[in-house]
Amino acid sequence: MIDQPTIDRILDAANIVDVVSEFVTLRKRGVNYVGLCPFHDDKTPSFYVSPAKNICKCFACGEGGTAVHFIMKHEQLSYVEALRYLAKKYNIEIHERELTDKEKQLQGDRESMLIVNAWAQKYFTTLLNEHIDGKTIGMRYFAERGFREDTIRKFQLGYSLDQRDALYQAALKSGYKKEYLEKTGLIIAYEDGKVSDRFRGRVIFPVHSLSGKVVAFGGRVLKKDEKTAKYVNSPESEIYHKSNELYGIYFAKQAIVKADRCFLVEGYTDVISMHQSGVENVVASSGTALTHGQIRLIHRFTNNITVLYDGDAAGIKAAIRGIDLLLEEGMNVKVVLLPDGEDPDSFARSHSASEFAEFIRQNETDFIRFKTKLLLDEAGNDPIKRSTLIAEIIRSIAIVPDNITRTLYIRECSAKMEIDEQVVLNEVNKIRLSQYEQGRKTTAPEPAAPQQPQPAAKEETPSSPPTPRIRSPYEAFEVALMRYVVRYGERILYDYIDEETNEPVQLRVAEFIRSDLEQDELTFYTPVLKQMLDEAAEHSHEEGFEAHRYFLAHPDPLVSRIAANLLSEKYQLSKYHTKNREIEQEEDRLDQLVVRDLFAFKEAYILHQIREKQEELKKLPPDAVEQMMGIMQEIAQLNEVKKVLSKELGERIILKM
């Protein structure tokens, strides 16, 4: 783990303008810089960078934060990986805490295996480009597939000699241990002591992790031999779990975020050909059935996925069984059927990116409609087959988590299948209830209901799977108070002598807000905001603590994004408005503003309690007189508190900060 002093040095050195300008063209606008947002399709500059606050913020899509969080989002790195990225950029030596013996062993094994794989990738690439067999056999194959030299270099393609242990011998000469060559799957060791190269006589496709490290290899045989598998892949290892990896994700991640869509294909060459044609937001499952891990990897970047199929009916039927998982994960799934005789590889080689996009636009359909048509066409007029296939379609609808989407599917499929909508609805709800009772769900299922669909709320941009947020009825008031905490949390709000103890007392902003709420047995009811308030209050007395810096550098991206939002100010007063008068600063009135917003929060809480009691009153039966009297008394007491709060608030003026 990176120690805190090193993290502090990295944060001090990382200049937000310097970091962002590597990826975005920035122009000065007043005291800030502005450019086109790299996280959405930005037509007019909406991405602001503040050198003074050392943060960035897009006022269109909401993305922003510190230099660390910009790199996390843009390069799709973890918090620690982003720190390492910036440390390397600013030549800062990484100091880490002492690891346990077990941690050292695991880390040592992983690092050794990654080092061995990095060496093997260079070895395969060198053979492809410099060895006579590589140039005449391997390079010839790639040329026949239509791959350009720049594409071959980009994907680090290679070739393995058709010799029993050429790689093994070369690795030993270079000082690499047999143990790690075997653990990575580069060699196969037999009980009689003999060793053979796993990928001998094959062209090589390195598999990169999300951060660009080579974690595995795929090898395609070039000889026609029915006894030899066409493709061989690295086995599972400490660094490679095929259920969590997608071929091409490292090269596609930024394009997926920008397009807000991912194309899913089957093989290595499909991905490479599409990249070469200009379609870069594409990944491959590499011939394996989709897994939850792979889907969540895509879901980090987008909710939208388009699956490309060739015209092979058997292949389609096999593949659609796995796509139900996409629906279960809440993905918006589209399907495109390519023309007969075409696969993504051949289609991409014969079409430009614009032609490809136009074909997709005209031919894509959502997965449920596609599956309905496919299965019903197969069933024909056979009532038994139709019944079985209709049940399968209903099972797919039942796993869609979004109620509105599920309702729309119910309506459309009932029309296509010529079945009463209520019958489909009942079957869907039966399945969902059964799933819940079997423990497949952690929350009660939301039954679908035939109703007019309402527009869904806009979701957060998915650089990663969206962080769950539990909202409270008081969130707007909590945010108003949290704004003071993030900006001025460590500032002394009240400084006085305690009359009883005669001791000096200093109450800081964060500490005062929390203690004032606790006196009335209140707190923040939005979990992430409560967490932030507690952390600020607990750290506020520490020497050198600055709330804005603490939260902007927070390892939780949601916390840092909230902090960036609360620190951002898009608009500033012009020089004309500030030329001849002194503007009263917010920090000069903190004692008034904080108390005012605390009263506003408490009033909102009381009003909500009154409404709940009134609803409770309405539900009581007419003969429950004693309960009615008790609730009415509680409402009267709440109204008395409300009067006091209203008097304290007086005529409130809503200020735009």
Image (tube, grey):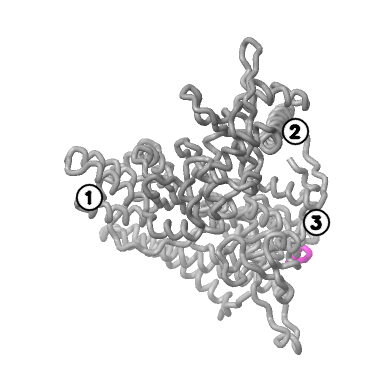
Kind of element beneath mark 1: helix
Pointer 3: residues within 10 angstroms few (<14), some, or many (20+)?
some
Return the residue at label 1. Answer: 417
The amino acid marked with disc number 2 is Leu
Relative height, residue 74 to residue 582 (above, below): above
Which one is nearer the viewer's eye here, 627 or 47?
Answer: 47
Q: Which label is found at residue 99?
A: 2
Q: Position of residue 200 (x, y in %)?
A: 61, 26
Viewer-side label of 2, 1? 1
Tell which residue pokes out farthest to the bottom in this image: 580
- Counting from the top left corner in percent of width and height, residue 560 is at 65, 57
> Considering only order in the chain, which callout, 2 or 3, is on the residue closer to the N terminus?
3
Judging by the rendered image, the residue that carries numbered circle 3 is 13
Q: Quadrant of the C terminus?
A: bottom right
Q: Earlier in the sequence, mark 1 or mark 3?
A: 3
Towards the viewer: 416 or 312: 312
In the displayed orientation, state which residue is furthest to the top. 192
Q: How many numbered dots are placed on residues in this image?
A: 3
On screen, residue 26 above or below 191? below
Three-letter code for the amino acid on which mark 3 is drawn: Ala
Are circles 2 and 1 on residues that touch, CB within 8 Å?
A: no
Residue 613, above or below 170: below
Category of crowding for the residue at label 1, using alpha-carbon neighbours closer than 10 angstroms: few (below 14), some (14–19), many (at least 20): some
Residue 114 visible (yes or no): no
Quadrant in which residue 212 is drawn? top right
Q: What segment carries the magenta color?
A: 492-499
Left or right of residue 55: residue 633: left
Judged by depth in the image, the label closer to the viewer, 3 or 2, is 3
For the residue labelled by badge 3, is the local secondary structure a helix, a strand or a loop? Answer: helix
Q: Are marks 1 and 3 in contact (CB under 8 Å)?
A: no
x%, y% of residue 469? 52, 54
